[in-house]
Image (cartoon, rainbow, N blue to C red):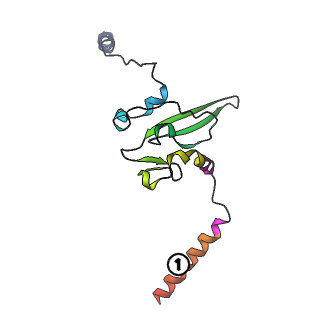
Amino acid sequence: MIGIITGLIFCVVVSGMPRIRVDRSIPLERFTLPDNATSIRENIDTSFSCNSKPYGYYADPENDCQLFHVCLPVAFDGRRSETFMWSFICPQETVFNQERFTCARPEDSIPCQESAMFYSLNEKFGQSESEEETPVVDQEMEANNSLEEETAR
């Protein structure tokens, strides 16, 4: 009996809770931005698309590179694929530097209009260092070790 009363009370409480309404007229991509995004950039262009882009981070030139997007293509069962997109906004007075994958002051970044030329850097995600670069690192480490040994004597 107590279980039935508890169940009824629960149903009454849940049915009285406010429901979340989603405005379908706003593109879904915009939902990944924080609530205060328009305080940083008033007019946000939502035309960026991840279609046919490999995994990576992409500056959004239509938004003066104040926004960037992470694209993640996923294959399901080898038959169906879908690309997921998450959008982010850089802090005030910064832009996304496509060359370094960070938000930076405009004077410390590549020109926004050139960002698309650096999209190919995303293809390096998941790759190991090339064999050509490894010997240079090894040589530097050996030089540092030799210097430390001489200093210790």
Magenta segment: does it hold 44? no
Residue 112 in the image: state x and y as whole percent: 50, 46
Which residue is rendered at x = 38% and y = 36% of the image?
41
Observer-nearest of 116 and 146: 116
- Which residue is situated farthest in the right direction here? 79
Number of numbered discs on residues:
1
Where does the magenta region start and end? 120-134
Q: Residues within 10 Å of mark 1 (few under 14, many from 20)?
A: few
Whether residue 60 can be seen here: no
Residue 76 in the image: state x and y as whole percent: 65, 31
Residue 44 in the image: state x and y as whole percent: 43, 32
Q: Give the side of residue 148 with respect to residue 76, left or right.
A: left
Observer-nearest of 68 and 115: 115
Residue 72 in the image: state x and y as whole percent: 57, 38
Whether residue 38 can be seen here: yes
The quarter of the picture where the N terminus appears is: top left
Residue type beneath disc 1: Asn
Which residue is rendered at x = 43% and y = 54% of the image?
107
Q: Give the side of residue 5 with respect to residue 153, left or right.
A: left
Residue linked to disc 1: 144
Q: Is residue 21 above or below residue 125?
A: above
Q: Secondary structure at mark 1?
A: helix
Q: Give the side of residue 45 with respect to residue 77, left or right.
A: left
Which residue is rendered at x = 37% and y = 19% of the image?
20
Q: Is residue 138 above or below residue 17?
A: below
Magenta segment: does it hold 127? yes
Observer-nearest of 73 and 87: 87
Q: Is residue 7 above or below residue 140?
A: above
Which residue is rendered at x = 63% and y = 67% of the image?
134
